[in-house]
Amino acid sequence: MLKKTPLAGILFAGLAAFVNGSVGVLSVFLFSRDLSSSDVAFLKCILACFVAISIVLLSGKSAALKNYLRQKWLLSAVCAFFGFFVLYHFETAAYLTVPVAVVAFCFIGSATLVTFMISALLQRRWLSFRETVSIILALIGMYCLFLANTEEVHNIAGRPIAGLIKACLAGGGYGLFMVLAKYYRLGSGMVVIASLTIFASIFLSVPVILNAELTIPSEPKVWLGLLSLAVLPTIGGFWFTTKALTLLSSQSVQLIELLEPVFALLFGLIFLAQLPAGMQLFGGAMVLAAILVHELWPKLSHTGK
């Protein structure tokens, strides 16, 4: 078992970035099978809820789930609204009109800004110089990474404005989730995930009810895609993220999760012998610099005193 150390928190945040990388590709695949954005968001969440509750029941933690819901139902509902409903509803809808790379860029940029700004607001302070430098380095790095992968990011102004707004709203919701989960001590573990997905399923059912239509897939491949979304980014991603938040600050977790495209570069190099372009290397270096500045600056400052 991993000890509760900052290093373990870094590992959990990195794993969250790894599994979250599957969202865009899987969502686009499901859209090609005539599922709407509301269908995908609701079905993957209800599947995740079923899986999470089943795990809780099979592990004999039903009493713990009842106690958790009794004590933290309001916090769970608020975090589920921002972290699941706002995230999934708007992110999934954004993929309908905006390329995956552009959605990822807008999502990550808004999530980073919101995480840092709301954290400072709750602590009643201004952003520090260290945080400002970290944000700037992170945004430059992400822009370079996605610019190297697709010209769509460079031509971002030409994309449908509604899709860009939805991607930013999704990132803002995720950023708020990170801050609230850390600040109000949401906790971690499968009991927490089960609680969150219960409320998230209720919230995500609203657009389906308002549209008065829910497409039930018949293809096994579609159900496999939905189950993959339920298990990897929904259960796995949030399990790793909430675990990391118990060990690190929300700002640190958010920055580390920016490593998602960096992992993609490494996998391409190791398994496909794809050499990264100079722009990609520079972008990855900027992301790593943002993390190092945020994490090591206090230690270096303390050492220099």
Image: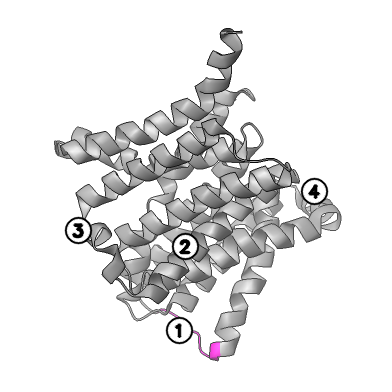
Q: Earlier in the sequence, mark 2 or mark 4?
A: 4
Q: Residue at x 62, y 54 (%)?
A: 176
Q: Earlier in the sequence, mark 2 or mark 1?
A: 2
Highlighted magenta segment, given as a residue range: 211-217
Circles 1 and 3, Cβ within 8 Å, touching? The answer is: no
- How far apart are labels 2 and 1 at the CA level? 27 Å
Circles 2 and 3, Cβ within 8 Å, touching? The answer is: no
Element on which disc 2 rests: helix
Depth check, mark 2 against mark 4: the one in front is 2
Left of 84 or right of it: where is 275? left
Relative to 38, say whether 185 is above or below: above
Quadrant of the drawing holding the N terminus: top right
Q: Earlier in the sequence, mark 1 or mark 3?
A: 3
**Residue under label 3:** 151
Element on which disc 3 rests: helix
Element on which disc 1 rests: loop
Q: Residues within 10 Å of mark 2 (few under 14, many from 20)?
A: many
